Amino acid sequence: DAMVIQNPRYQVTQFGKPVTLSCSQTLNHNVMYWYQQKSSQAPKLLFHYYDKDFNNEADTPDNFQSRRPNTSFCFLDIRSPGLGDTAMYLCATIQGRGSSYNEQFFGPGTRLTVL
Amino acid sequence: AQSVTQLGSHVSVSEGALVLLRCNYSSSVPPYLFWYVQYPNQGLQLLLKYTTGATLVKGINGFEAEFKKSETSFHLTKPSAHMSDAAEYFCAVSRYSGGYQKVTFGTGTKLQVIP
């Protein structure tokens, strides 16, 4: 089945130790999103890629970076994680950019804990 | 600007009882509205969506929602709750802005189903 895969599902890291989260998709969608979801909160958009075009949300901390080497893969790099970065990180994809009503397909998420 | 308000962060219902999860939206343009469900430690799964046309939308697992423009509401209902419905539900509004689809999520409602 076509799907969105995130690895690892659970990640524990130390304060200040860089960490990379991975997302891959078999849907061949051209748009990929990264969301941060803290406990009991709504998902918050960090950034998205349209093909290779990177779009950062205005309030996304500089500590968060992203790479998309090809259509299938997208990475979230946290350069110096702080305790406040403990959260679930969700990857989502969508086909097309010219429509508001296509649904986003979500991966299962990576739960990151910063100690 | 767009926003979503979900009334009630926690809702408890008895098994077999009616499920009603409330969502009100604010949007400066005709909205596209979604309901997503999230099970523990998983990503979001689309339940249903409203784009245009019929205002009563049927989704998966017996859920439906009615778009009421006059009330700016998109409440989610299910006639008879099942234990497997226990999860967190997110209402979302989407619009095409600045060249991409931007989705704004509500803060979520956790549904508890009591045997």
Image (spheres, rainbow, N blue to C red):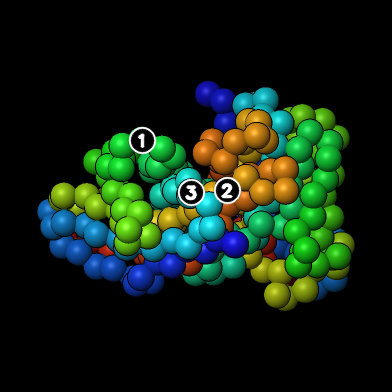
In the displayed structure, A115 sits above or below B58; it is below
Residue at the far left in the pictured view: B16
Disc sitting over residue B53 in the figure: 1
Disc sitting over residue B95 in the figure: 2
Instruction: Answer left or right for B62 relative to A21.
Output: left
Whole-number angstrom distance, CA of label 3 to CA of label 1: 12 Å
Q: Which residue shows up at 37% across the image and 60% down it? A: B72
Query: Mark 2 vs mark 3: same chain?
Result: yes
List x then y, in percent, for residue A114: 72, 70
Q: Secondary structure at mark 1?
A: loop
> Which mark sits nearer the N-terminus, 3 or 1?
3
Disc 2 residue type? Arg
Q: Which residue shows up at 24% across the image and 68% down it? A: B12
Q: Are marks 1 and 2 in contact (CB under 8 Å)?
A: no
Q: Quadrant of the C terminus of chain B?
A: bottom left
List x then y, in percent, for residue B32: 48, 46
Q: Nearer the viewer, mark 2 or mark 3?
A: 3
Whole-number angstrom distance, CA of label 1 to CA of label 2: 17 Å
* Residue toward you, A112 or B24: B24
Query: Mark 1 vs mark 2: same chain?
Result: yes
Residue marked by disc 3? B30
Disc sitting over residue A67 in the figure: none
List x then y, in percent, for residue B25: 44, 61
